[in-house]
Image (cartoon, rainbow, N blue to C red):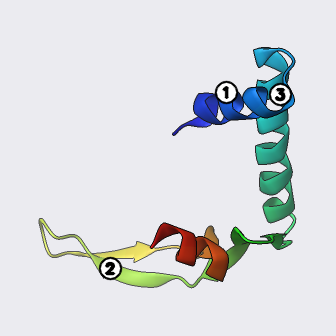
Amino acid sequence: MNKSGLADVVNGVIGGTKAGSEKVVDSIVEAIVGSLKKGEEVSIAGFGIFTVKQRKARQARNPKTGAAVNVPATIVPKFRAAKALKEAVK
C-alpha cells in the first residue's frame, strides 16, 4: 500500500472527496516529520513509536577498493512497532 492507497481507505471511512482524503494523509505525514525534525517522539497507540536516533561518525571500508571512508555523524528516523501491531501481523 502506498500514500494513494491510504487516501482511498480514509476516503472510504470518512467520505468526502479524494482530494480531501489525500490532504488528511499528507497532513498526518507532515505532522510526524515535523515532530521528528524537532527531536520529538511520535507515539501512536497500538501502532508504534517514531523517534530519531543520532549515529556517531565512523570509519567504513569501500568494498570495491578496500579503502577507508569516513562516514559523518547523522540523525536517522527510527520506528519501534507496538506489541499490538506485532501480534496483529503474526
* Side (left or right) of 41 relative to 9: right
Residue at image location 12% in from the left, 68% down from the top: 65
Q: Nearer the viewer, residue 83 or 35?
A: 83
Q: Residues within 10 Å of mark 2 (few under 14, many from 20)?
A: few
- Eye-nearest disc, 1 or 3: 1
Q: Secondary structure at mark 1?
A: helix
- Eye-nearest disc, 1 or 2: 1
* Side (left or right) of 39 relative to 51: right
Q: Position of residue 25 (x, y in %)?
A: 77, 37
| Quadrant occupied by the C terminus | bottom left
Q: Quadrant of residue 80?
A: bottom right
Residue at image location 82% in from the left, 73% down from the top: 41
> Residue tagged by mark 3?
23
> Residue tagged by mark 2?
60
- Asked if residue 55 is positioned above or below residue 89 in the image, the reply reads below
Q: Nearer the viewer, residue 46 or 54?
A: 46
CA gap, disc 1 and disc 2: 43 Å
Q: Position of residue 36 (x, y in %)?
A: 79, 63
Q: Nearer the viewer, residue 24 or 32?
A: 24
> Residue tagged by mark 1?
8
Q: Secondary structure at mark 2?
A: strand
* Residue 17: mark in rendering: none
- Eye-nearest disc, 2 or 3: 3
- Asked if residue 64 is positioned above or below residue 86 in the image, the reply reads above
